[in-house]
Amino acid sequence: MGRNGSKSEQSSTLVDNFHRPVDYVRIAVTSLCNLRCSYCMREEHEEKSDEESILKKQEISAIIEVLAGLGVTKIRFTGGEPLLRRDIVELVRQAKTQTGIKTVSLTTNGVLLDRFLPALIDAGLDALNFSIDTLDGNRYRTITRREEFCRVRKNLDLLLTTDALAVKLNVVLMRDVNSDELHQFVDFTKHHNVKVRFIELQPFDDNQIWRTGKFFSADNIRALLNRSYPDLHPVRGNATEYFSYTQPNHKGSIAIIPAFTRNFCTGCNKIRITSNGKIISCLYEKDGVNLLPILRGNGSHHALVDLFRQAVSQKPRDGRHTLTNSVRTSMSEIGG
């Protein structure tokens, strides 16, 4: 595929129909995962083994090159579990060397982090989100259905020994599952310069457990925090981290992400790319726009630019109203 677009294409930006610039892209590099979290996948969740449908390294690099020319400045690699890609370090390195890309980050469950952390830092990774929903080994096994807690906790401790990365802990908080651990995670910020992000359960899971009373809303999380920590100081977070706080004498900080109630939809600045090459303009979008025919059909740079513009033009002002029409699927299919 030809990579050289016109100067006007290179200098243009992605803006949706509601005048919101899109400068952040989440790229799922695999839909596979080495855990089976109860709120994400059934144990028997189909393992997609068709390697031909998965974006190749050079295709991801071509996508990032085009996106950088369209004003995207932030790339996050997700999955599935992105560390299951053997070329993940090279993908990070290529993204970091692309003119226009300012921040490259990655979300991981931490199982394989010890194998990749030094190389990721060397490749220029800026930030890492570490998903861990409990600090209790038995509970970890119940949630993830895997015996990996000791390794994951050891890898978290390893991560905290470096100051080369901005670190966030992602905690999906569920009623009567791990909601009683909120205090332990807040206490975790006292001695560690990390941001703990409490995330609402989302309706993208094979078992639909969000319908079974496990949903713990951002309002409930906020009320519990305010009752337990009257000295919390509100600070300005990003659009996703709708509520952000610092606590006196704590090195780290706290945020709440209303992932389902979605207070932040109207300020959304992101799109997603699935591991099989579809552009998803909104988390609740049903089908997406397929990149593979252009990428694998010797399509032009201009054609790829047009596809991204088409996808962004479909971005709704607020995606929540489309929920009832959306495909119920694992977040590993969507891109984290």
Image (spheres, rainbow, N blue to C red):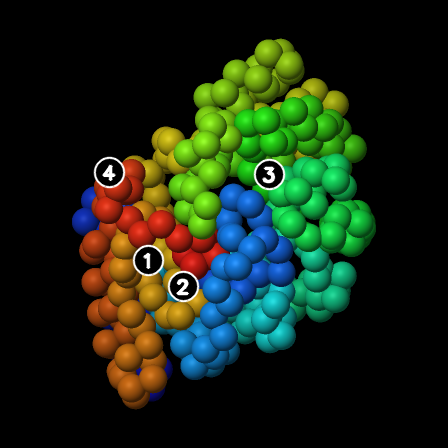
Disc 1 packing (10 Å; few <14; some 14–19; many ≥20) = many
Report the disc number at residue 321.
4
Question: Are the residues tagged 3 and 2 within 8 Å (C-beta)?
Answer: no
- Residue matched to label 3: 171
Mark 1 and mark 3 lie on one chain; the one further toward the N terminus is: 3
Residue 262 point in image, percent of width and height: 37, 34
Quarter assignment of residue 10 = bottom left
- Residue matched to label 1: 280
> Which is more toward the observer, 208 or 273?
208
At x 59%, y 53%, the residue is 36
Disc 4 packing (10 Å; few <14; some 14–19; many ≥20) = few
Question: Are the residues tagged 2 and 1 within 8 Å (C-beta)?
Answer: yes
Q: Amino acid at mark 3?
A: Val
Q: Amino acid at mark 2?
A: Thr
Mark 1 and mark 4 lie on one chain; the one further toward the N terminus is: 1
Classify mark 3: helix, strand or loop: strand
Count of all numbered marks drawn on residues in the image: 4
Mark 3 and mark 2 lie on one chain; the one further toward the N terminus is: 3
Question: Are the residues tagged 2 and 4 within 8 Å (C-beta)?
Answer: no
How far apart in space, not on screen, are marks 1 and 4 (Cα)? 16 Å
Report the disc number at residue 258.
none
Classify mark 1: helix, strand or loop: strand
Residue 175 point in image, percent of width and height: 55, 27
Q: Amino acid at mark 4?
A: His
Residue 69 point in image, percent of width and height: 36, 68
> Which is more toward the observer, 157 or 150?
150
